[in-house]
Image: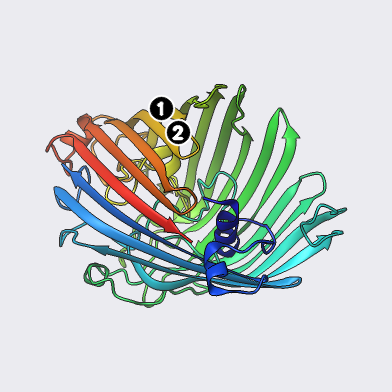
Amino acid sequence: MTSRVVLSALAAAGLTTSPALAKQGPLAQALGAQDDLQISVSARSRFEGIDNQFRASGPDADSMLSLRTDLVAEYDAGPVRIGGEVQDSRAYFQRSNSTASTGEVNALEPVQAFLRVELGDTGTGAFGKGAKGGHGLLTLGRFTMDLGSRRLVARNRFRNTTNAFTGVQGEWTSASGLRAVGFWTMPQVRRPDAAADVADNKIELDRESTASQFFGGDLTLPSVLGGTLEGYAFRLVERDRSDLATRNRRLWTLGARLFARPVAGKFDHDLEAAWQGGTARRSTAGADVADLDVSAWLVHAEAGYTFKGGWSPRLSGLIDAASGDSARAGHYRRFDTLFGARRSEFGPTSLFGPLQRSNIISPGLRVEAAPTKRLDLMAAVRPGWAETARDAFAATGVKDPGGASGRFAGTQLEGRVRYWLVPGLMQSDMGAAALFKGRLLRSAPNGRDNGDTLYGYWDLTLTL
């Protein structure tokens, strides 16, 4: 993808703090747009299929065609920028009892509509080379967010729909590279959520209200212990409303991360730990009114090395662990992943996606390479255990309340090949995964001893 297309799309999508672009993208040029108006569109089609379902519910085999179209635009009016995005996400041909949900369908949704004010002491605009004291942005309206590692707050990329928020976000980056982000938001609740409406790709606007609030801050410090140090504190507060039952979560999530990004000829690392406290209910059932004391945790550790050479191969070892619920009276221990993304570490999601950062212990090995500028490859393997034998393993819903099925859930293998058919315009992404089921997934009371799970997908994305 050419830099101007990438930056145009990301700026309007809220994934970058770049100013309005100096160069027009292909679509804006074709439309004859003025230099201060950036427009881009992308269209992705995906066909995927799964056999020998691992979940406690859903069809034994399923396939689906999903389509996602994004139109993003941003107008630069000097210190104020006006931006928006309409995302149309639909799914077709899946089974009547498919696991497809609001993660796949959100038709014709204005996920972003914002005002963005540039702040700072600069010589050539808020992000010019003449910056003296730092620069910042104040964003108001509807927007998406990527924070830190994206494990807890992220704009989804592989998933057909995305997390989005309504509120205010401010960020500041000093001349020395220190970055601070603060936000108060109301998470958008994707609609529709009824299975029949999802199957029909019904158009219904997402909703937000003060009944669900998400706020906090993130601070990043460069050049600490050979890398970058990040600390964050997030607060989620929700309550039931007439059209939405919740678990009445009132959670604090406090965490820290130390990381160094991959560089050819050097080792890199990524260490993150988070603790969660507060109160929550075990379910959304109307009869469940017990507020439980929450104490949950998350750990991620990764070390890698990128070799010099034409393919720039990177080999990494990693481990993820997150607490599960022991069903102890008055207490809740299952880690809540909030609004995070998981594809980069846990494999494809959508009809697949057994792994997530809840009740899991999973080491892994991963290799990546880029033989050419147009082609990149990835393969990974990771076994998984339940951290707590009596809780549902990760995202599978499979659970043995008595713990007699043990903790070993299975081993996941995955591979991916991405290739630019037309550099900067059209990319193919093909992947496959297999889950070799362990005793827990086969023998639990709601498990399925139907064979190992096989999954594959093919994406074709056009970006203008």
Name of the residue lying farthest toward the left: 450
Q: Is residue 296 left or right of residue 361?
A: right
Q: Is residue 135 left or right of residue 399?
A: right
Q: Is residue 257 left or right of residue 420?
A: right
Foreground of the two, 304 or 8:
8
- Tell me the CA gap for discs 1 and 2: 9 Å
Q: Which residue is mark 2?
A: 320
Foreground of the two, 424 or 182:
424
Residue 290 in percent (x, y) is at 39, 59
Q: Is residue 287 above or below residue 47?
A: below
Helix, strand or loop under label 2: strand
Q: Is residue 93 left or right of residue 368?
A: left
Q: Is residue 113 above or below residue 326?
A: below
Going 33% across and 31% down the picture, which residue do you hit? 385
Going 23% across and 37% down the picture, which residue do you hit? 402
Colour scheme of the rendered structure: rainbow
Going 51% across and 35% down the picture, which residue do you hit? 299
Disc 1 + disc 2, Cβ < 8 Å: yes
Residue 52 in percent (x, y) is at 16, 41
Q: Which residue is mark 1?
A: 364
Foreground of the two, 23 or 396:
23
